[in-house]
Image: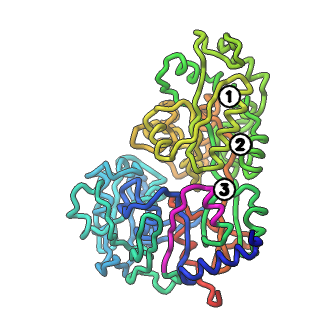
Amino acid sequence: MLPRLLTLCLALVSFAGMTTTNTLSIIPELSNGFVQNYNPFRTDKLATTRDFIFEPLMVFEDDMVHYRLAESYALSSDLKGITLNLREGIRWSDGTPFSADDVTFSLSLLKKEPELDYNSLGKWIERVEKRGKNEVYVSLTHPNAQIALQLQEAIIVPAHQWRDIKDKRFYLNASPIGTGPFTHIKAFSSNNIVQCRNPYYWQQDELNVDCIRYPQVRSNDELISRLSNGEFDWASAFIPDIERNYASYSPDYRYDYKPSTIVSLLFNFDHPDPETRKVIQDVRFRRAVSMSLARELLIDVAVFGQGEIAAFASGLEPRFKDWITPSAAEQHLYYIRFHPKAAARLLDEMGLEDKDGDGFRDLPSGAPLTLRLISPSGWSDFVSAANISAEMLSAAGIHVVSQAVSFGNYTDLMSSGRYDMGITNYFSGPTPYRYLDSAFNSQYQTPNDARFSQHGYRDESIDKLLDDYLLTSDKSAQKEIINQLHLRISKQQITIPLYYKFETVEFTTSRFKGWRMLKDGSPNVPPIWYTERARLIQLLALEPIDDF
């Protein structure tokens, strides 16, 4: 067998032969094969569609706003409207000037063709008005102090192309026209994509990367192997023992991670079996499940210590601790810690006993209680966490079978309510609102919505508090609402928070410089995943290293 160093050198030589120093290799999403689908309104669009072909109006990152197609915005005093001031001098990739007409057309589409509105943004839009060459006013159906944050997810398409397209939802848009930096599809196959420079990109002087390359990677394990061979410049992957299995291979192999959103177990409150449904809907059962899990051990074994134990029973991130009063934070903390004896007492109270002597608790009727816990195959950290959780619960007498399924099947099972238990992470945001809204707002419990709130638990009080949050821009009032939401969610233990996933980013400094750093010299590189708008800001800071 060749020594590790020689193998690495050969891999780098081979890779250098098929690319250039200003082609950035990225992995924004795992894939089983590519279809030339650049329709930004489709949920199955390619992961290089957003940002790189269709730029957002603006990008919010922590307390900073990066203006893109818009150069400023202003909320109306009653919070029922927002004025967008658009940047001048932008052109679409076919040379057509970008204008307020494009923004008016694109936002109005969400009302006229709601099947394109997968972000549920259209429900906020009453009407869209062009008020000048570069000014658009959006009138809202209800006051919303957070509408600017939501508008960063808006898709802006060229009206001159999309106006005449019928059946937009089924259109693949194989030859896209966009305002982003990489609109030229130079190469496309089922296992490799190369997108190159938009000749009319409005920040041409700031763009030092000529092309992005996106090769097919099927699983997290494959991604780790190819990362360790130096093939990719930028990725976001869970790597067990990342220092030994990645960073030690080369001083140019860098990584950044920080605790991010919660990974949780959730139940199907609409379970088709009436007796199982009654068990799931009993908060004592959910608390017993939670207290049967040794989270520190789960983190050590399932994710090799690369996680942080859940600190809030509602699943809020630790960075939002100032939003929750100390008494509210402590009130339900007991139920997300390992207390197996207390868990057993709750299960006994419910009449869930081992009636047939097989070591597992049965339903009160005597029928077996068996729950299937699904996770997306290829997501090795989720699969491991699900497997360990199932083992811990089975050891506590709760028969749980872990099953990894394809990601498409996983999301379909959850959105259609054909599952018992699932494991998921959640969106993050500059405030706690995005997580709480996506995880617990009952309006997102339709077959067309994402997996995050597909537990089926409905609480009008939670929905009202989420609505109330959008009615004020006063920080103290917002904190009080979040505190109430935390208490109500924690009291019912709607989901089972496990651990905070480390948001891991891998990048190499051998071919590109300009990776963002904090003042103390630590990395501040955003994930390259398709959900991260800040990836565009990082890309514009990169420069090829001339002597590579």
In front of the other: label 1 or label 2? Answer: 1
In the picture, the quarter occupied by the N terminus is: bottom right
Give coordinates of residue 204: x percent, y percent: 46, 84
- Mark 2 or mark 3, which has the lower sequence index? 3
The structure residue drawn at horizontal position 29% and vertical position 74%, both measured from the top left corner, is 133
Dot label at residue 238: 3
Dot label at residue 289: 1
What is the count of numbered marks? 3
In terms of depth relative to the viewer, which is nearer, 103 or 439?
Answer: 439
- Judge whether residue 225 is colored magenta: yes
- Judge whether residue 63 is colored magenta: no
In the picture, the quarter occupied by the C terminus is: bottom right
Q: Where is mark 2, residue-wise? A: 310
Instruction: State if disc 3 and disc 2 touch (CB < 8 Å).
Output: no
Vertical comparison of 475 with 346: above or below: below
Q: Tell me which amino acid carries mark 3.
A: Phe
Instruction: Measure the C-alpha gap from mark 2 to mark 3.
Output: 19 Å
Crowd band around label 1 with a 10 angstrom C-alpha radius: few (<14), some (14–19), many (20+):
many
In terms of depth relative to the viewer, which is nearer, 202 or 364?
Answer: 364
* Local SS, label 3: loop
Q: Tell me which amino acid carries mark 1.
A: Val
Residue 350, located in which quarter of the rendered image? top right
Residue 449, located in which quarter of the rendered image? top left
In front of the other: label 3 or label 1? Answer: 3
Q: What is the span of residues highlighted in magenta in the rendered image?
A: 211-226
Give coordinates of residue 98: x percent, y percent: 32, 75
